Amino acid sequence: DQQVKQNSPSLSVQEGRISILNCDYTNSMFDYFLWYKKYPAEGPTFLISISSIKDKNEDGRFTVFLNKSAKHLSLHIVPSQPGDSAVYFCAASTQTGANNLFFGTGTRLTVIP
Amino acid sequence: DVKVTQSSRYLVKRTGEKVFLECVQDMDHENMFWYRQDPGLGLRLIYFSYDVKMKEKGDIPEGYSVSREKKERFSLILESASTNQTSMYLCASGNPGNQPQHFGDGTRLSIL
C-alpha cells in the first residue's frame, strides 16, 4: 500500500519557467517531508525538507509547500534550468523510531532549453 | 560533506550465489538503511539499523539479511540470489528525528 504517491510519472517544462511537482500522502502521522533529486547512475541527493509545523520552506530556487488538510505537498522550481532535469522523489516520515522514509514513485522532470 | 560509500557500482552474480553488498558512512550517523529501487515502484526499504548489532525489517526483507558490526558499516546479504533480486540497491545513513538521510551512489546488481 503506497502511503506516498506521485501521480505524474513525468513533466516537461521550458527553461526559465516554473516547474511544479506534486505529492500526496495518506498517513496523517507523517510530520516530516523531503524532496530528493536523482540523476541516472547516482544515488538520490537531498534537496529540501519541511516540518509539519510549517506550510512553506524556501531554499534558493526551490520552495516546498505543505497542505496538511489536503495531505498534499508540492515542490516549485523557479526558474527551471536544464540541469534540473532529473527524477524527483518525495518522501515522508514520522518522528518515532529510526526516521524511516516512505518514498513516492518519482517524477521525471525534463527542462527543455 | 557526508559520504556514503557503496563497495561496488555494478555487480553480476549467478542464481543461488550468496551476495554481499557493503556500505560505509563517515558521518557518525546512528541509523543506516538499505533500499532497492525498481522502475515504477520508487525506493522500498529492505532493512535498517539504529545501532550496532541492531536491525529491523523494512517493507521487503524476504530473501535478505543484514549485518552491522561497526557503527560506520552496514552490509546487505542475499542469502541465495534469485533473478527477482536484480535491482538497484541504495544504502543511506542519517540521524534520528527530523534529519534527512544521505545516500550512496548505488549498486546495480544483476542476477543471471
Image (spheres, coloured by chain):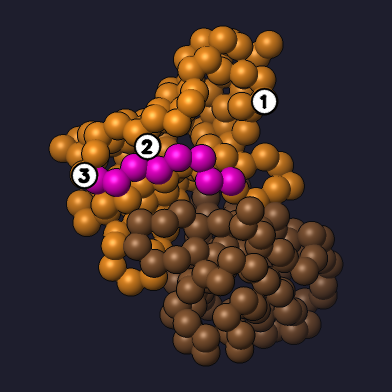
Say which label, 1 or 3, has the lower sequence index.
3
Among the chains, which one is orange? Answer: A
Query: Does dot 3 land on a helix, a strand or a loop?
Result: loop
Question: Mark 1 is on which residue type?
Answer: Gly
Taking the magenta stretch, the answer to whether it contains residue A47 is: yes
Q: Pointer 1: what residue? A: A83
Mark number displayed over residue A53:
3
Question: Mark 3 is on which residue type?
Answer: Ile
| Residue A39 position (above or below residue B50) | above
Question: Mark 2 is on which residue type?
Answer: Cys
* Few, some or many residues within 10 Å of mark 1 (<14, 14–19, 20+): few
Please name the color used to draw chain B. brown
Say which label, 1 or 2, has the lower sequence index.
2
Q: CA distance from mark 1 to mark 3?
A: 31 Å
Q: Are marks 3 and 2 in contact (CB under 8 Å)?
A: no
Pointer 1 indicates a residue of which chain?
A
Q: Residue at x 22, y 56 (%)?
A: A29
Q: Is residue B36 visible?
A: no
Q: Pointer 2: what residue? A: A23
Taking the magenta stretch, the answer to whether it contains residue A64 is: no
Which of the two marks, 1 or 3, is nearer to us in this view?
3
* Few, some or many residues within 10 Å of mark 2 (<14, 14–19, 20+): many
| Residue A60 position (above or below residue B15) | above
Q: CA distance from mark 3 to mark 2?
A: 18 Å
